[in-house]
Amino acid sequence: MKPSNHSIVSMMLTIDRRYIFVLIALATLIPLLNPINLPIVISPEVRAVYDHMESLPEGAVFLLSMDFDPASKPEVYPQAISLLRHAFKKNMKVIGMTLVVTGTGMAEEVIATVAEDMGKINGIDYTFLGWRPGASAVILSMGQDLAGTFPQDHYGTPIDELFVMEHVKTLRDVDYAVSLAAGFPGIDEWYIYGKDKYQFELGGGSTAVMAPGLYPRLRGGQINGLIGGLRGAAEYEKLLDQSGKAMAGMDAQSATHFVIIVLVILCNVFYAISRQQKRGWRRT
């Protein structure tokens, strides 16, 4: 007796791969368009950044260095949104900048967009300094004379004319700095040439693949917290009780992984059944 070409087992083992692609696409798109808000466990390293931000008083100086390029945007951009929302919510003085020239446009976009959403005014509540060449040399120079390093902001306004920079002369006047990095320059440079020399508190955010290499700095107290990848950004959104792109992205990632796991299990089950059927046909 020969196997039927119309059997369920045969159909499943010879299914057109395009159906699988469509299934994966739907598992990705549906949670992005309509987030499920799956449960998220908050890691200690992300909570440490959040708790330190919470401990800062109104009017504290918060420096966010967005040291990433467009290739890292899906993971790190949501981190920037959450940190800026938190800082503006607490009425901190926010200073934005970047050490990566290709990320300047993105960094300016995110700080301007979040500030507008929260009714904050450029020059009074925040400023975006932009980019200067030199990476580690820029950090060293900021520690000695911030206005000398950035005589003007990104829009050409002299630093001395900005209310938000009134009492900020060097990095020693910064209450908390966070570097969101995707490589060099980034968190390592901010610690070696910044915190270690000028003694300000430093936190970090990075892509998921980069995060494990930063745990020695975290365990050694060289950074006080770490937001790792899209998962870390989603955890921060959860702490803020504000669902955003990161939580939607984690929903999509979880749904896609679930579909892949189910498909792998089904493939193995149907393969085992087909082998069992073949043994039965051989005996007959």
Image: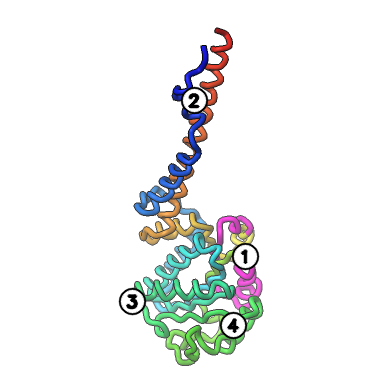
Q: Amino acid at mark 2?
A: Ser
Name the mark nearer the viewer: 4 or 3: 3
Name the mark nearer the viewer: 3 or 2: 2
Could you tell me if residue 134 is visible in this image? yes
Q: Which residue is mark 1?
A: 183
Q: Is residue 227 magenta?
A: no
Q: Residue at x 44, y 23 (%)?
A: 6
Q: Which residue is mark 2?
A: 10
74 shown above or below 131: above
Q: Which residue is mark 3?
A: 119
Disc 3 from disc 1: Cα separation? 33 Å
Q: Earlier in the sequence, mark 2 or mark 1?
A: 2
Q: Earlier in the sequence, mark 4 or mark 2?
A: 2
Question: Who is closer to the viewer here, 281 or 231?
Answer: 281
Q: Secondary structure at mark 4?
A: helix
Quadrant position of residue 205: bottom right
Name the mark nearer the viewer: 2 or 1: 2
- The image shows residue 261 at horizontal and vertical percentages of 49, 37
